[in-house]
Image (cartoon, rainbow, N blue to C red):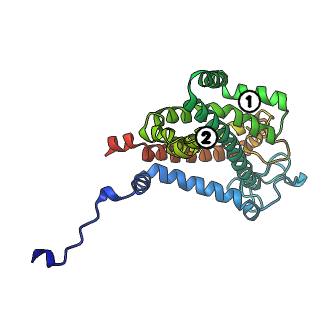
Amino acid sequence: MASLLPRKKSAKNPEDRHPFFDQLEQLWRNKTAVAGLLVITLFVLTAILAPFLSPHNPVEASLYDQIKPPIWAEGGAWKNILGTDDLGRDILSRLVYGARVSLLVALATVGIAVFFGSFLGAISGYYKGFLDNIIMRFMDILLAFPHILLAIVIMAYLGPGLTNAMIAIGIMYIPRFARIVRASVLEECEKDYVTASRSVGARDWRIIFVAIFPNCLAPLIVQTTLGFASAILDAAALGFLGLGAQPPTPEWGAMIAMGRSHILRAPWVMTFPGIAILFAVLGFNLFGDGLRDALDPRLRMMSG
């Protein structure tokens, strides 16, 4: 008789839930990561909507509006809310368009580093031996140089300019991603599914990039997010040195460099670009740390 009675639906086992939802919940509980995501969203929207948000042409100079203070200072006006620089260009407009330049640099440089670093790291970790030693020693040589010094050396060969700055920064980030992917591939190669793939005759490239590589994405995603922050900072450093974006392109590092000579007379010229760099880098760092905590199961076990 008991078998004829309708069975009650059992509550869904929490263990049956996909790990992605646990990671998303862990990320959402991290208030600093959410704050970082909000800053990143604001940064990206500013870059995309720059033509609509900018009140003036960012490269248009005006001899009648040189060194105008922000609106809250004495002599400020609504025409230039954050003031103007020594050429009469609107600071707010240049900041808004500078966000677009910084986002472009971050996407290009991290894209270069992820592509080549992942390829070299995967090949090195899978084949090991002599090839692994050659690739990793070359990565060690690149890591032995200070990042900015290496970028300056590359820029000395390529010449100044925004495109060359992207290439230089991308090259100096390749070892970071190569080492992370190599470590993950070495760990995955010891698992049974790789042995099974080899036993059925799967080709090496299929094992590496179809079977193994998707399982290496968690640390790669975290490093990519943190790489955006480093790319924005290094691009600003090259711009400050005059090796990045060339005038009149609105770039935050170059804006700080141009404002050095007016730091006492017009501190806002270099203060606002510095604040923009600070918040952009901070946003990516906070979100990257939150992603690391959410995607690393060992950290979740410790926090739980």
- Residue bearing the label numbered 2: 205
Q: Position of residue 152 (x, y in %)?
A: 76, 28
- The mark lying in front, picked from 1 and 2, is 2
In the visual, does 7 lie left or right of 202? left
Seen from the viewer's position, the closer of residues 274 and 136 is: 136
Residue lying at 58% horizontally and 43% vertically, measured from the top left:
206
User: Residue farthest to the right?
Assistant: 63
Q: Quadrant of the N terminus?
A: bottom left
Residue lying at 84% horizontally and 50% vertically, measured from the top left:
66
Seen from the viewer's position, the closer of residues 49 and 192 is: 192
N-terminal-most mark, 1 or 2: 1
Residue density around tag 1, few if under 14, some if 14–19, many if 20 or more, within 10 Å:
many
Occupied quadrant, residue 80: bottom right
Alpha carbon of mark 1 to alpha carbon of mark 2: how far?
A: 32 Å
Regarding mark 2 in the picture, which secondary structure is present there? helix
Residue density around tag 2, few if under 14, some if 14–19, many if 20 or more, within 10 Å:
few
Q: What amino acid type should be assigned to the residue bearing mark 1?
A: Ala
Occupied quadrant, residue 303: top left
Q: Tally the numbered discs.
A: 2
Residue lying at 28% horizontally and 60% vertically, measured from the top left:
13
Q: Position of residue 227 (x, y in %)?
A: 61, 40
Q: Position of residue 287 (x, y in %)?
A: 52, 48
Regarding mark 1 in the picture, which secondary structure is present there? helix
Q: Position of residue 247 (x, y in %)?
A: 85, 43
In the visual, does 141 lie left or right of 247? left
Seen from the viewer's position, the closer of residues 225 and 59 is: 225
Report the disc number at residue 211. none
User: Residue farthest to the front?
Assistant: 200
- Residue bearing the label numbered 1: 151
Q: What amino acid type should be assigned to the residue bearing mark 2?
A: Trp
